[in-house]
């Protein structure tokens, strides 16, 4: 999902005497100070499903409820909460809409969820799936290049029309493994092989 630039030195030509007297210092990218904390983002994927009872309501009542729902979304404070909406109609039978929420404060994500629960429409909404995560530096890339940038800690959504959400969870058994070669094999695989497990990552 990310590209990591490499530096290639150009060939050096010099006389034997100059080569013996002068050494070219290797170039290094500046390392991020370990004392500088990385500000991480909270990321939420919340899926909602309209209950069949809603569609049996009189049309004016449906319109009024949906209008209040749309107003809540449109009035979101984008400086505090990045909010993207995705329709799931025709793609999944268990959900109708998904909210992708991103914020530096967990309170903002919870506040929006609470605002939805206060709407009249909330009595006709179910939440089949809800995922919460936090951005972080890649522990695998750190082993290759500990000075890599912090691009994984800041999400810039909305670049594509579709988003695919693949929940990925490592079990306790993984962390209890004492077999270092097994973990090393996983690290090497994650660097070189494409992901073929549809439940193993999140991508846009």
Image: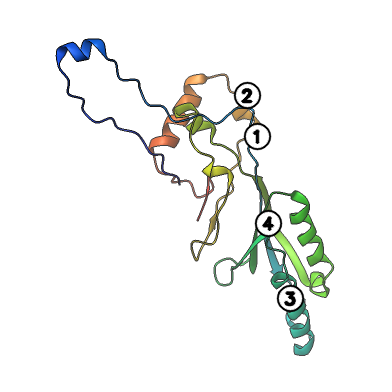
For residue 129, the mark is: 4
Residue occupying the point 48% across, 62% down: 160
Left or right: where does residue 3 sit relative to residue 105?
A: left
Height in image: 58 above or below 203? below
Q: Is residue 95 visible?
A: no
Tell me which residue sits at (72%, 64%) in the image. Answer: 77
Q: Is residue 97 visible?
A: yes
Q: Helix, strand or loop at disc 3?
A: helix
Q: Which residue is mark 1?
A: 37
Judge by depth and name the residue closer to the eye, 107 or 32: 32
Tell me the residue at 81%/61% (across/down): 114
N-terminal-most mark, 4 or 3: 3
Report crowding for label 3: few under 14, some 14 to 19, many 20 or more residues within 10 A (C-alpha).
Answer: few
Q: Label 4 vs label 2: CA separation?
A: 28 Å
Q: Earlier in the sequence, mark 4 or mark 2?
A: 4
C-alpha separation, residue under disc 1 versus residue under disc 2: 28 Å
Q: Which of marks 1 and 4 precedes in the sequence?
A: 1
Q: Secondary structure at mark 4?
A: strand
> Which residue was labeled with disc 2?
176
| Between marks 1 and 3 in the image, the one whose residue lies nearer the viewer | 1
x and y percentages locating residue 196 in the rendered image: 43, 46
Q: Residues within 10 Å of mark 2 (few under 14, many from 20)?
A: few
Q: Secondary structure at mark 1?
A: loop
Q: Which mark is residue 71?
A: 3
Of tags 3 and 2, the one toward the viewer is 3
- Gap in angstroms between the C-alphas marked 1 and 3: 37 Å
| Residue depicted at 84% across the width and 68% down the height | 118
Distance (Cα) linking label 4 and label 3 = 23 Å
């Amino acid at each position: 999902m990310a590209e990591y630039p490499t530096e290639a030195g150009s060939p050096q030509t010099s006389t034997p005497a100059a080569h013996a007297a002068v050494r070219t210092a290797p170039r290094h990218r500046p390392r991020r100070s370990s004392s500088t904390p990385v500000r991480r983002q909270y990321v939420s994927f919340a899926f909602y499903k309209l209950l069949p009872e809603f569609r049996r309501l009189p049309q004016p009542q449906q319109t009024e409820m949906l209008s209040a729902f749309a107003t809540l979304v449109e009035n979101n404070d984008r400086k505090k909460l990045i909010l993207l909406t995705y329709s799931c109609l025709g793609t999944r039978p268990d959900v109708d809409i998904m909210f992708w929420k991103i914020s530096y404060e967990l309170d903002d994500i919870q506040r929006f969820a609470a605002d939805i629960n206060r709407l009249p429409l909330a009595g006709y909404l179910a939440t089949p799936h809800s995922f919460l995560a936090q951005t972080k530096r890649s522990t695998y890339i750190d082993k290759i290049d500990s000075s890599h940038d912090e691009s994984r800690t800041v999400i810039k959504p909305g670049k594509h029309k579709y988003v695919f959400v693949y929940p990925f969870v490592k079990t306790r058994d993984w962390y209890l493994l004492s077999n270092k070669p097994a973990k090393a094999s996983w690290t090497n695989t994650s660097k070189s092989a494409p992901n073929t497990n549809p439940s193993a990552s999140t991508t846009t």
